[in-house]
Amino acid sequence: MTPPFRWHRAALLVAFFAVPLTSLLADGPSVALKPLYTHLKIERPISVQIPPDGTGRRFLVEQTGRIKILPGEDSSDEATLFFDLTGSIGVEKDFEEGLLGLAFHPKFAENGRFYLSLSRQGPKRLVLAEFQVLKENPAMADAASERVLLEIQQPDWNHNSGNLFFGPQDGKLYLCAGDGGMKNGVFMLPQKLTRWNGKVLRIDVDARTGSLPYGIPDDNPFIGNPIACPEIWAYGLRNPWGASIDSETGLLYLADVGQDLWEEINIIQKGGNYGWEYREGAHDFANRDALMTALGLKTGLPEGFESIDPIFEYSRADGISITGGYVYRGEAIPALTGHFLYGDWRFGNLWALHYDAATEKVVGNVSLEKPVDPKTPTVQPTAFCPDEKGEPLVLDWRGAIFKMVPKG
């Protein structure tokens, strides 16, 4: 697939730009947010994952360090504690650090293996580790089974990302990493192929390459580059929050949190550069030249610089922190089929974006939830997760879970 939008060096104007929200915004299907598990105590939920073992169990990931198996009955006031990592993770500021991702091995039913991304200190780092369930009790994790796969050094406490998922077609594990923190991209890591920060990484957990505790897939894009980390699948990202691969089209959707002006949605391509810290959304990053001048470095775009623009963006008029989700393939809300569900963490706006893979264009964006007052939103979304039937669960930062259902 050719890049849908590309920015070329020397500040040339491009024929296409990321589609702004206001140009396509329309009313969507009539949906409601139905509160679930109202009798449970839930702390900063960031993911619900369904293991591929046929049980339909819902595993809730709390950023504070616990993984719980949600009860089968919505009215229940008890969840099963699957894993307590509150003593294992390390945080300086729990706003963005903590337990950040969970992915079950595609053959979890056979091997009981799962993968976590989490924060640790001394030094500050994002850890990707493999665990297994207890042999005598598969409803509990075996803490002693930890096998660290990789550790990404974090210069500061924010922009960790940690989104984690297996490719439905290739069976490889994808990990999203933020740019290392602070404002203005001051650490200048996303464009460096020698670092994992600001990247999407892709590894094979069922193989070994040399002395590595994982395999490097043969088709990773930078294997032939002697100075590049071979785990890198794509680069130039700020703080990915909400990425997934559509099982039908194979497209990797990724929501990247902006800094001052733009929130964006990207279609991630093999070897693609998504611009940060030279670009924010489909625009030159306004603070970049000022930073380079302050550091006594050359301003402007580097020689030969190219990056792929997002397929979609919205401005600070509609929100300040994007939360991505997944492409809806359920049955209860047919009008949303093929739409990428996403929202804004702070303002509580929820939308569904329709990207046509055949034409490589956004053909629609519908509003699903717009609070009367953005200061008091119905939900502050941290994730959109498919349940065991593919129906949307919307997680609320404040400690709640909603199910998106047709009204009536």
Image (tube, helix red, strand yellow):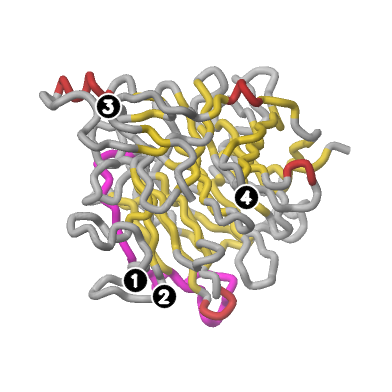
Q: Which residue is mark 1?
A: 215
Q: Which residue is mark 2?
A: 206
- Amino acid type, label 3: Ala
Q: Percent position (x, y) of residue 117?
A: 41, 56
Mark 4 vs mark 3: in front = 3
Report whether 380 appears left or right of 32. Answer: left
The residue positioned 75% from the left and 32% from the top of the image is 28
Given residues 256 and 125, the one toward you in this image is 256
Q: How many other residues sit within 10 Å of disc 4, few (<14), some (14-19) or many (≥20)?
A: many
Alpha-carbon span between mark 3 and mark 2: 43 Å
N-terminal of the pair, mark 2 or mark 1, is 2
Mark 1 vs mark 3: in front = 3
The residue positioned 32% from the left and 75% from the top of the image is 208
Q: The residue tagged with tag 1: helix, strand or loop?
A: loop
Q: The residue tagged with tag 4: helix, strand or loop?
A: strand
Q: Percent position (x, y) of residue 178?
A: 36, 43
Q: Which residue is mark 3?
A: 10
Q: Does residue 71 sit above or below 142 in this rendering?
A: above
Q: How many other residues sit within 10 Å of disc 3, few (<14), some (14-19) or many (≥20)?
A: few
Instruction: Answer with the quarter of the image where residue 256 lies.
Output: top left
